[in-house]
Image (tube, helix red, strand yellow):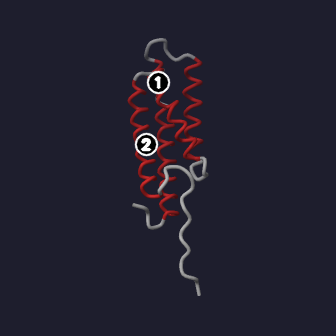
Amino acid sequence: MTAPDPVRAGKALGGAAAAILLMEGIAVLFVPRGIAQSGEGLTSTRLTVVLVLAVLLILASGVQRRPQGLFVGTALQVPLLLTGLISGAMWFVGGVFLLIWLYLLQVRKELLGTPFGSPPTAPPGPPAG
């Protein structure tokens, strides 16, 4: 099944991808609080890694209109999931966000025919006259 208006569907799915990445960035900002209360605590290295990841996720939400935006967002799912090495609860949070991201790519594939790349241009309509 493909969308009747692939350009519009592509824009809507790009907005959804941006929203997911923004929510991921905000969720990662809650990680330092959990790290501080566990194990070794909040070291400067851990804090730096978490803050850099949060900033990258938020910045990636802004590039979802560009052709490489989905590639950037997909690549950032790996470090998000690996934050589980820092805080055990992030295995769950990262896994949930990864499943949401994969679902978005699946919907995009069904509506646009491809999970990545630019949406196809609208077919030429009747001449305006």
In the image, taking residue 107 as reference, residue 66 lies left or right, namely: right
Residue 87 x/y as whole percent = 44, 22
Amino acid type for the residue under numbered disc 2? Leu
Q: Which residue is mark 1?
A: 33
Amino acid type for the residue under numbered disc 1? Arg
Judging from the image, what secondary structure is the residue with disc 2 in? helix
Are discs 1 and 2 less than 8 Å apart at CB?
Answer: no
| Quadrant of the rendered image containing residue 57 | top right
Within 10 Å of disc 1 (Cα), the crowding (few <14, some 14-19, many 20+) is few
Q: Which mark is residue 110?
A: none
Task: Between residue 107 and residue 84, name the one nearer to us.
Answer: 107
Residue furthest out toward the top:
40
In the image, taking residue 125 as reference, residue 3 lies left or right, namely: left
Q: Which residue is mark 2?
A: 102
Q: Height in image: 123 above or below 89?
A: below
Residue 39 x/y as whole percent = 44, 12
Q: Nearer the viewer, mark 1 or mark 2?
A: 2
> How many numbered markers are drawn?
2
Gap in angstroms between the C-alphas marked 1 and 2? 28 Å
Within 10 Å of disc 2 (Cα), the crowding (few <14, some 14-19, many 20+) is some
